[in-house]
Amino acid sequence: MSRSRRLGHIVTYTPIWDLDVFFKGGSGSREFNDYLEQLTAELGVFKEKTERFQLREDSSESELSEVLTAFQYIAKQVGQAGAYVSCLQAQNTKDVQAGLLRGRITNISAEFGVILAQLDQKLAEIDDFSWNKLLNSTFTEIKFVLNERRDRVKEKLSLPEETMIQSLAVDGYHGWGQLYDTIVSKMTVKVEENGETKLLSIGQAFNKFSDPDREVRKSVFQGWEEAWSQNGDLFADTLNHLAGFRLSVYEKRGWNDVLKEPLSLNRMSGETLNVMWETISRNKGPFLKYLKRKAELLGVERLDWYDLDAPVGKANSKMGYQEGAEFILKQFGQFGSQLESFCRKAFEDNWIEAEDRADKAPGGFCTSFPESGQTRIFMTYSGTPNNVATLAHELGHAFHQHAMEDVHTLNQNYAMNVAETASTFAEMIVADASVKKAGTKEEHLALLEDKIQRSAALLMNIHARFLFETSFYEERKKGAVSAERLNELMEGAQKEAYGDSLGTYHKGFWASKLHFYITGTPFYNFPYTFGYLFALGIYARAGKEGKSFEEKYISLLKDTGSMTVEELAAKHLSADIKAADFWEEAVKMTLKDVEEFLELTK
């Protein structure tokens, strides 16, 4: 294992993560196998405790405390095991043994879910008087989470029915999600570059969309679309079965709105979601002008999909991994000492897998190892400004988890939308600094445009995903949707989200975007946009208050797992996010960059 090295006062960072600190031996680890065996045994003990638990008038609240303590313990172990296998699969998509381990983890998680369903059912059976007495005496700290669990179970089916759903999901619902990963792991993208035909992994090909050479981008896009369309029927079957399973469960529970579950999981009201999208749609005009101006600068009438991430200007802005790490740490240090010192530790202790090599999974993520109090970050780093921003983004996720370390375990389960707030906040710090440090007008323009690209992606690309998924689910209620029809829905959603301003669209995006196939999170789209705009409000406060704001920021992060987003905004930002004013102010902050870009490129 290559390690970060200290040369004098300088630490050389290695872009390869260390997983051996958790379990030695990778997917063949005997240590990890023993851990899973022990976890299975502990799960049996937790099951017995839950089955025995029955809160009566004459029983002690210590019985509930005992069950909840066991709950926390198992949750950490399941999280640790799941994170480890996710890392194994990401670092090498051809690791067959890691895929088998994923199956074991899925079974363990399903069994854990069944036990929790039983526990929740028992909590729901406690009469309101006894329940409130318990919460206000012993369990005040985790009152929100316990009430949430109790309320949610009341909207579900009976325990035997929910148990059956959990069991069938292992080889049904989750099985389809795993099939998607298997198909993608075998894919390559054929690209013509410098007169040579190359086969790139999905992750390597994706990075080529920011290549300054339009012919390279075009070649990658053609190969990209072809690669995904070759397996289009398989992906369509997979997506249809995932959605079909969800819809069947929703129907049995009496849920008519497909957004009921994702909104509940994000602790967010439909009113807040609607006003956010309405405000964005009203303010897209300047972004359409930006897309038109960018097309002019690239010498084309209209941008094609593969031009969206194309660089504008001449910036010598490629940063090697070491340089990128040092730049990020320097900017984080300007915000606050705790963010900087934590992220320095992440670099020094090899928490990051960033090497640009074949057989890695596409995209990036941050995952938590709750038993160890550590996180791991995954991405493919090739030195582009977008890579630097992505690395900062994932470090923001890691810091969020770090900020929660001394919070009660049951209060650490924060929703995806607020998770994206911390990551986006960290990304903004670095993106703004990149623009400000530009030495020339051309470099300033290039870095400013790269920043606007991300804003456009969050306000337009994510909107397209939301529109597509909403329309797809409506059609899926009537029956399976063909690959050809999925292409039509995707292209229609992109045209609406981008104001029909592009020359060509990525109709196969529904197949290439992993987020549509993640079984743990329905509608894995709008939380990104929420997190981005919510983070803008926080970022504005940070700019006004300087380093003293870091403690307030950490306080906000600590509350993200124990209140709704509306309550969080009211408490820490004194804002009503059900009102358009909050979102108008946030969107207008993104438009300042667009206005500057249009002025610079007159």
Image: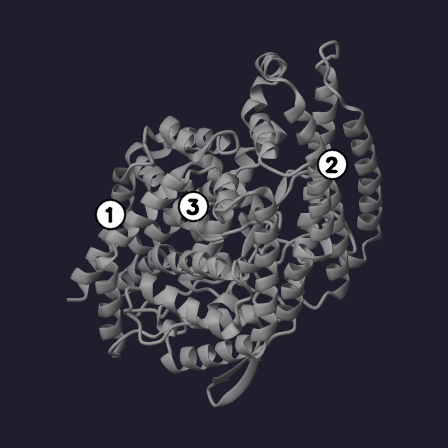
Q: Mark 1 vs mark 3: which is more N-terminal?
A: 3
Is residue 456 among what the camera can see? yes
Please name the residue that numbered disc 1 is placed on.
588
Residue 248 horizontal/vertical position (percent): 60, 52
Q: What element carries label 1?
A: helix
Q: Mark 3 vs mark 2: which is more N-terminal?
A: 2
Label 1 crowd (10 A; few <14 / some 14-19 / many >=20): few
Tag in front: 1 or 3 = 1
- For the residues marked 1 and 2, what is the alpha-carbon distance in whole angstroms? 47 Å
Tag in front: 1 or 2 = 2
Residue 426 bears which disc, if any?
3
Label 3 crowd (10 A; few <14 / some 14-19 / many >=20): many
Label 2 crowd (10 A; few <14 / some 14-19 / many >=20): many
Q: Which amino acid does label 2 sit on?
A: Ile
Q: Mark 1 vs mark 2: which is more N-terminal?
A: 2
Residue 115 bears which disc, if any?
2
Q: What element carries label 3?
A: helix
